[in-house]
Structures are given as structure tokens and as C-alpha cells.
């Protein structure tokens, strides 16, 4: 059974930083495409950042590039999203997701931009609030 558990969200002031973590069990993240997605009520879910199964390719939503960094620790089987310079419009529910089929989606940008429709295993989500 594959499970993904996000942590590290919460309330932060504008300009602040957070690091989200996604602890994965049931598969080895170094063989599976993974990503971070977010959604606010009334809007479609969007791809924030994704990483290919081999770690060579990454994708960032263009407006986030430079402020967010995706990384993974294969030994800990954990995916991370470091977020700097947070703004009120970054507030959302953030989800970690993966693809259960190994070694898929090398062209990770294409799939990330599709908002997660191609990812079949999801965490429960974690809230990020950016406010004074």
C-alpha cells in the first residue's frame, strides 16, 4: 500500500519561508515521478513543481521559479518543497503526489502542467496560509 504524508505547512507572514515534506511509504521515490500541487477553493488544482523519477528533470510553475525548490532524499524516501518569499496568493492546500508506475513521465513538465490528472497516489494535503 502506497501512502504519502505531508507535513510542514502552517501560517507564515508574507515574505516568510516554509519547507513542506512528503514522507512516502510503499514505493521508492527514486523510481517514481513525484510532484507538488496546490488548490484553493473555486479554482482548479495546479502543478507547483514536479521531479522526474530519475531526478534529472524538474518543472516549476513559471511564476514560482526562483522562489520554490523541489528536492528529494532517496534514503529517507521523502520529497521536499522549499518555499521562500511567500505571498498571500501562495496560500492554498498543498498536495504531494506520485505515479505508481515506475520510470514514467520523464518529460515531467508536460504532466505537471496538467494539474495532477496523471498522478494516481496522493497525500491528504496540508494547508499553507500566508497572512499578517
Image (tube, rainbow, N blue to C red):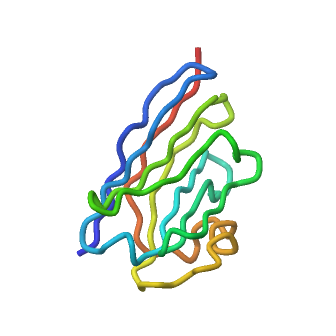
How far across and down, in percent of the image, does residue 29 sit?
A: 37, 69
Q: Which quarter of the figure is the C terminus placed in? A: top right
- Give whichever of 108, 91 is nearer the camera: 108
Res 105 → quadrant: bottom right
Q: Residue furthest top?
A: 132
In the image, taking residue 29 as reference, residue 16 lies left or right, namely: right
> What residue sits 57% from the left and 51% below the top?
38
> What residue sits 63% from the left and 65% below the top?
115
How far across and down, in percent of the image, does residue 23 sit?
A: 31, 55
On screen, residue 122 above or below 99:
above
Total tally of numbered discs in the picture: 0
In the image, taking residue 57 as reference, residue 25 lies left or right, namely: left
- Give whichever of 97, 72 is nearer the camera: 72
Q: Residue furthest right?
A: 63
In the image, taking residue 54 as reference, residue 66 lies left or right, namely: right
How far across and down, in percent of the image, does residue 16 sit?
A: 56, 23
> What residue sits 28% from the left and 65% below the top?
3
> What residue sits 57% from the left and 41% below the top?
92
Q: Which quarter of the figure is the N terminus placed in? A: bottom left
How far across and down, in percent of the image, does residue 83 sit?
A: 56, 38
On screen, residue 90 above or below 50:
above
Amino acid at each position: 500500500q502506497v501512502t504519502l504524508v505531508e507535513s510542514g505547512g502552517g501560517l507564515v507572514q508574507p515574505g516568510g519561508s516554509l519547507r513542506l515534506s512528503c514522507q512516502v511509504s510503499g514505493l521508492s521515490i527514486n523510481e517514481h515521478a513525484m510532484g507538488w500541487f496546490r488548490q484553493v477553493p473555486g479554482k482548479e488544482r495546479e502543478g507547483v513543481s514536479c521531479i522526474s523519477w530519475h531526478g534529472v528533470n524538474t518543472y516549476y510553475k513559471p511564476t514560482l521559479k526562483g522562489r520554490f525548490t523541489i528536492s528529494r532524499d532517496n534514503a529517507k524516501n521523502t520529497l521536499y518543497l522549499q518555499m521562500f518569499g511567500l505571498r498571500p496568493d501562495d496560500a492554498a492546500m498543498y498536495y504531494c503526489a506520485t505515479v505508481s508506475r515506475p520510470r514514467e513521465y520523464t518529460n515531467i513538465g508536460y504532466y505537471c502542467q496538467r494539474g495532477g490528472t496523471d498522478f494516481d497516489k496522493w497525500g491528504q494535503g496540508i494547508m499553507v496560509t500566508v497572512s499578517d
